[in-house]
Amino acid sequence: MSLIDVWRDFPELETVRLRLRGLRGSDAPAIFSFYSDARVMALRGEPEFTSEKQADELLFYWRKKFAGCDGVRWGIEIREEQRLIGTAGFKTIDKQHQTGEVGYELHPDYWNLGIMTEALQAITKYGFNTLQLHTISANIAPDHVASRRVLEKLHFQPEALFRENYFYQHWWDSQIWVLHKKNRA
């Protein structure tokens, strides 16, 4: 199967308000819009995108992760709007240890509406029930209050703090939050 065709069997998820779907090449402009937004990237420890080509490369990377069965990234849409407003999914999946690490971002127009909590609830359910994961983690900047609140609502627990373990323009701390299958919401 080619990377172009890899989304054919992509698992779609639905919630009350959201549709989580495979990403398409036509999503590059939307992905660029939030990856180039300083508000979105402020606490990611990554540079803002400067060209849509970077969004194309990110889409290709996510397709390769899915094709290799070691990651899956969904596009987030409000069902009625049918336009990409964010992405979320498993940055990594380790089958041997039955673990996955989630990552996510959302366009600022949709912040503080419970959208990411709703999306991650569906994704963690998929991780535990379909992928048979035992543990799901998230790696965030400790001062990323919004991300911390999302994880708390889903019963993730802080388990590790790494001081100055990541460098982009300055040293960043990382905090690992974990949800065990037995503790899920």
Image: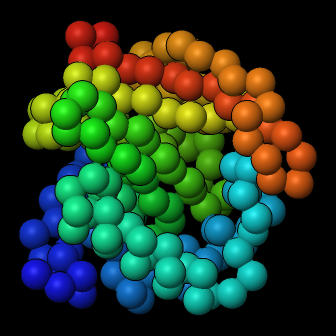
Q: With 61 as the anchor, is 2 left or right in this view?
A: left
Q: With 96 as the anchor, is 93 left or right in this view?
A: right
At x 56%, y 25%, the residue is 176
Q: With 74 as the anchor, is 102 left or right in this view?
A: right
**What is the number of callouts on the image?**
0
Q: Is residue 99 above or below residue 159?
A: below
Could you tell me residue 116's position as x and y percent? 48, 44
On the question of residue 118 being in view, the answer is no
Q: Residue furthest right?
A: 170
The part of the image, by quadrant, that contains residue 84 is: bottom left
At x 23%, y 62%, the residue is 68
At x 56%, y 56%, the residue is 106
User: Quadrant of the image for the C terminus?
Assistant: top left
The part of the image, by quadrant, that contains residue 171 is: top right
Foreground: 171 or 24?
171
Could you tell me residue 137's position as x and y percent? 43, 29
Could you tell me residue 166's position as x and y percent? 73, 41
At x 79%, y 47%, the residue is 167
Could you tell me residue 52's position as x and y percent? 61, 87
On the question of residue 77 being in view, the answer is yes
